[in-house]
Amino acid sequence: MIKNFKNTLKTEDTNLIPLEKLGDYLILPVNLNKEVEHFIYFKKHNKKNSEKNNKLSKTIFLLNLPVDTSKQHLCRLFRKCGQIDNIIFNSKESSIESNNFNWLPLSSGSSCHLTFVTEEGIEKALDMKQRLRVWSDDFKDPFNDNEEQVQPQLYGFTKYIELFKSSKPSQNILQKNVEIYLKAFDELQAEKKLNLQAKKNLPDEDGFITVVSKSKQKMETKSDNKKLKKKKELVDFYRFQMRDTKRQQLADLRTKFEQDKKKIEILKKARKFKPY
Amino acid sequence: MKRTANKKELKSSKKHKSIKDDTKLESTEKEIALDEEVDVFSDEDFIEQPNFENERQTVVGDSKFRPPTAEEMLMLKDTMQLYKSSLFRFQIEELLKEVQFDFPKMIESTLHEVKSTLDSIESVSECSLADIISSLGVSDIKIPFPEPKPSTHNQLKFSFIKPSKIFIVGGYLLKSNVKSKNEEKNIDVAIQMPENLFQEKDYLNHRYFYKRSVYLAVVAREFNKNSNKLSLKAEFQYFNGDELRPILILRGSKDNSLKDISKTNTIIRILPLLPENVFNLKKLSPNKSCIRYTENDTLNNKEENNNRCSTPRYNTSILQDMGFVSHLNYLHVNQKKCQAFRETVILAKVWLKQRGYGTNGDFNSFIFSMCMAWLLNSGPNGAERRLMSTYSSFQLFKLTMEFLGNHDFEASPLFLTKNGCPISDTDFSKANFSLYDVAIVDPSGRINLAGHLSTSQILEFQESAKQTVRFLNDKNDDKFDLIFLKKVNVLHLEFDQLIKIDTETCKPPAFIPPYSLDYSSSTQFTASLIPKKLTAGLGTRLLQCSVRNSIHKKSWALDATPKMHSTFYVGLKIDQENSLRGVEYGPSAEKIKDVKAFKELWESKSELRRFKDGSIIESVVFENDGTFEGRSMTVSKMAIHLITLHCGIAARDIIIWSGAQFFPFLSLPGKSDVLLPNKSFKSVMDVFNSFQKKLKNYTTLPLNISTVQPCSPGLRYTSIFYPQPDNGNQMEIVKLDEALEVNLEFESSARWPDDFDAIQEMKLAFYLHLGKTITDDWEGSKATVSVNDRTQFNNTIQFIGRSILTERFLDVKSPEGYTFRCRIKYEREELLLEQLINPLPSIKQASTFGIATAKQTLQIYKHLFKLTPYYSYQIQQFCLRNPCLSFTIRLFKRWLSSHLFLNCQIPEIVPELLCCRAFMEDNVWSKPSSVFSGFIRVLHLITNFDWENVPCILEFEDFDNNSGINVDTIVEGFKGIRSNSSEKGGIGGGFFFIASMADPKCSIWEKGMGNNFDIVSRLITISKACLKHVNSWFENAEASDFAKMFLPATNFIDIKVNLNKSLIPKYYENFFYKKTFAPKKKITFKNLSNSTEGKLDKMEYLKYVDPVEVFFDEIRTANFIGDESKIFSMFYDFCGGDYFGLKLNKKFRNEVQEERKDFDFKVNLGFSSIPAAKKEMKGNKILPKVYLNFEGILAEIKKLGDDLVEGFEYL
């Protein structure tokens, strides 16, 4: 099998045109179905100031991946370049192990970093030639014979059924998991408490003991309802008071008047006075 | 005290006009609501110390505090006292400016020519009926004789002498003409017929009206002859809809000559009048019979005959022709006396016009002005006068409306005499005027100005008047536009049910002499009969009944006869609750008199029945099947029955719009193939209530359940279709079993862990425990806990609106087959999430959550556990109070869904709230009380609400003062959001800003939904089109047209993604359902089923999984669809739609259709691209360009959907 691959590669090398370029990137067209092409762009990953220099030189940066991209897909695509060490998707970082049915689509146009085991892989990748490439995850890793066969990704209704099934786990298992979690949580809490208790009575480096109150007392802000005895003031008694009130009232009226005038202007502009 | 003292001083000084105002106002202060503020301006200290003020001014330096000029003071003061507010005053002034106009100069010369033409008409010497008909016939004039036409044996002699007086009357003279868009402006020219044309007894048997018609016809001939010269075209018309009194109208002949007045949209009306006292007034009092009826007259007693056959309407028609001049004088005198009189008449005209009054013999501005003029002089029953001549137009208008709105016309006629009492002449007594439906008697005490008004017309007017006064008194809200600017007279918005009667002849059985004599046509009689019968028959179901017929507005050519084909519209305003009653209870059998009346009303339909409470009474039963649909038909059934019975109109000539036409849209197209037992919400609510009770009674749980909150539309009466129980396995067609969402809350406890993640596990433990408890206790029930943690990843929640809170739940299936999806609400979660977002420095991050996730989760928490239950409760309660709201909401949602908006662009709660708003709005129309009016008013709300500038606030309950949230704070918050965003050039807070006490910031819109201008303006356009469509039904009714409203326009969609119908588990809801395409499962025979036990057929999963919904989520995750930043906007009918509509978002559209839009290539473009051949140079660098990989994306969509996607269709 492997020998055959190498043979074909050699013959193709001489006949075919290298990949076209888009800026710094190489354009790698793949066929989603018989007619429609999708364009993946990739280039050598060269980020400066990185510590793992040796690993960097084995990494390519891929852009504009199809939304259903899985590791399998990429392994198949670069199968002729060599063994793949690791793939990191930039938009998808699942806390849950994804399998053939609970995979999430990538967002359109997203990217990933792909690291080959050897530097040879990256050279071969950059030297890829134009030819028909089919987008598929039907691939058995020749470098990993021991590993369990990875199931091809499911799509559509079949996938949704599996999803539904998995969302209804056996109630017993669920019960057990919950119990385990809560037990662990309780233990953790107990430990924390112990730690706290221990801290309480141990002097720290400077020889002080931190005092922690058992129940956090609510900080009761003293109510501001102090009834300030207001001095009784006669309103509208002195002449100046009356004058001031009146002046204030006039001012208020004027402001109101001006405001209303403005409002009317706005309404007028909106031509709101045409009754019909 | 101080105030009056000031006044006294000022009184003595009498400096300027405002003082006069003051004194006069004093006496009426209590009557009119004036702002009782301190009199700012009459303080002498203030005014008369300019020096002091100047000092102050320099100190303060604020122009607001400058000393007021006398003029300014006057103005400010007037506004305060005479108007509601200065804003209102401005608005009135603006309105007056807008509607007033002067006739162009050319009209004057036309009027002169009209006068000289009238003066030049040659006399016609006495001749017989036949002669005059033939001589006018030669000139192609058909004399507009009223019914009954004079018999050929009539000995009456006709002659013509030119008018003894010609004068201009009406609005032209009083300068109170009002602009209107479609209608012509009238100039009224009255011609007084010479007295010697008439004989003493001509008031009898239509003789006067025959002579009047001939007179008019001769005038018409003259104008017809000179029509080229004058550039005028003459036509006949009825005066105020009175068929006894035709008039002549002169229109511009449209010959484009200089004289042509058609450009000015003016018509001249020629009204023939009588001199005063031509006939003996006593002979024309309301109780007199002026039409002698001889045939079959079996009544011997002459007195009784007179009473029974009195012809009040006929008499008033003659009297009005006689009194016209004196009435005009009366108005003129009063207008001179009162400055604001003219303005008030203009306001009244606008008001009447907006309500459609005043054109067809109903309450018109003439009656209004007469009443107002009278109120300026005297008050009812000798009381003091109500109005002062110094009042502002606002006050005159308001007080006149208040008076007219509250006068009980049924109990007593209104006498506009000096002392407000009938004159001493017994012929014109109160009792005699009570022969009219409505009587407003002129100052002479003899002529009824409202003789042709029917009771229903005056009641309708009074309702409007009362409402307007209420609006005017509203201190919080400025309702100017509702009073004057809004067009009220819109058939489809005014009424709950609308009946159209389209008939050539109506022959009411009761329209026989002598009862018919007083009516000039059966149409007129029927128009007044229908409201009477319906009011009597429908009882408390009916609030108001109005008849609209437009026949009398039309003019007809001189050589034609008026078209008598009559189209009535009968509008009903009904009482929501009472209207659903199917049984009308009559009097008990013992009350013989009442029984007789009841039987006369219902005839054979009335039956004597014994009821459960033992009473034996006459009653009428309209059967129904007990559903809402059936019960809401009662009113229409009764109305049709009564109209056919009493008006002699065939049922086929009657069309009723009651909402019944909408019922088919809420019945399921595939109902015969899937088992659907429910025809109401009752069954599901019953099961829910018992479930709720069970939950609350469980004592074996670690914590007791304190509240159970329904959160599903199905549990608040608003799901488009009634929730149906799972029908087991009998049917071949698979249907989705939809769960009903419920929130549970436990009693408070300190034993919950203080950690968000741990709480989730704790909840899981609760679900498991609760599930076990329920299945043990409730026989036949099933409980399953679901966990789907796929939605959440480290940094963000991938599925919009879903999170760990929504995807973990307990499904409880009741023995009846309903699934309740229970989620536990725990209040502390909110706090913990907030802490995750804004961590206190002392607390370490302990969760697996990122801040972004916490933010999203918090939003979901608020949505799921706060807003949804709040609105569910409020809407449920509101539905219970408004019986037709539920159906309206369901219908509106179906409509929205069929237009591909619901759930993909507009969240489900939005239409529900919009409907509630339409039911609580204080509008010119009373609140909707039928499905018909409800639905139309929601559409109207959408199209007419000022979404950009006003928040739509729902006041389900009184605003709680403690929370600090009220209407003002919401409005303020809204304005803040809007003005912030307008600087950035967008609409902040979303286009539809719908807020309430629980949600002052409008957070009901989910991310990615279409609360933007594009989507909303589309919705508004569609609503407008539908309203227009509704309006067209009334002209040309075809029931099948209703379906058009529910057909989506697909012209805005670019691509249709056709779905595999056999994988749509809600396909049976599709309007175009066909059994052949529906999802079917393999039927397993019982004897063979053992082998496949435990394994479900693939198709059977459709009962639990809606692949369309998951697919929708997936392509949204792939960023293919979503808000404007994504590639497509998506449209889908979640009621079993069989295609997705994709619209390419603006970002990707090129102005030039053929060219593809190119983008600069960069790393995070966010969409799948194709390298473009086109390149751009920037300096030395080549900037690569890319296009959107359109086909590639479609292929990806197809790949994700797999067998669900059938193909694509480019539109």
Image (cartoon, coloured by chain):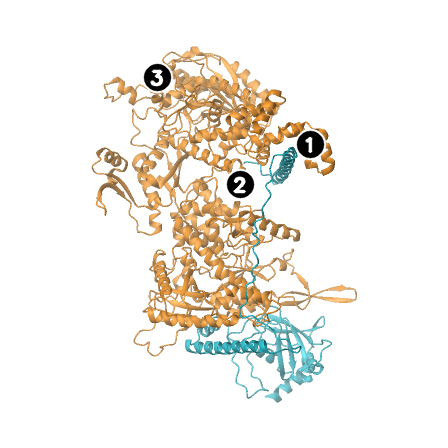
Chain colours: A cyan, B orange
Task: Judge the density around disc 2: few (<14), some (14-19), many (≥20) Cα neighbours within 10 Å.
Answer: few
Which amino acid lies under the numbered mark 2 shown in the image of this protein? Answer: Asp
State the quadrant of the N terminus of chain A: bottom right
Relative height, residue B1076 to residue B525 (above, below): below
Q: Which residue is mark 3?
A: B427
Mark 3 / mark 2, whichever is N-terminal:
3
| Dot 3: chain letter | B
Separation of marks 3 and 1 at Cα, in angstroms: 64 Å
* Secondary structure type for disc 3: helix
Q: Within 10 angstroms of label 1, few (less than 14), some, or many (20 or more) residues?
A: many
- Residue depicted at x 63% and y 22%: B15
Tag 1 residue: B67
Sequence-wise, the earlier of marks 3 and 1 is 1
Residue highlighted by disc 2:
B477
Residue B213 in sight: no
Residue B782, image x, y percentages: 36, 70
Image coordinates of residue B297 in percent, x first then y, are 25, 21
Is the C-beta separation of discs 3 and 2 under 8 Å? no
Between B128 and B664, the residue placed more toward the observer is B664
Local SS, label 2 = loop
Q: Quadrant of residue A245?
A: top right
The chain letter under disc 2 is B
Nearest the eye: B1124 or B833: B833
Q: Label 3 amino acid?
A: Asp
Q: Please, what is the three-letter code of the amino acid marked with disc 1?
A: Pro
User: Could you give the CA–CA distance between mark 3 and mark 2, rounded to whole angstroms?
Assistant: 49 Å
The secondary element bearing badge 1 is classed as: loop
The residue sitting at 37% across, 61% down in the picture is B688
Question: Which of the two labelled residues, at mark 2 and mark 1, occupies the earlier sequence position?
Answer: 1
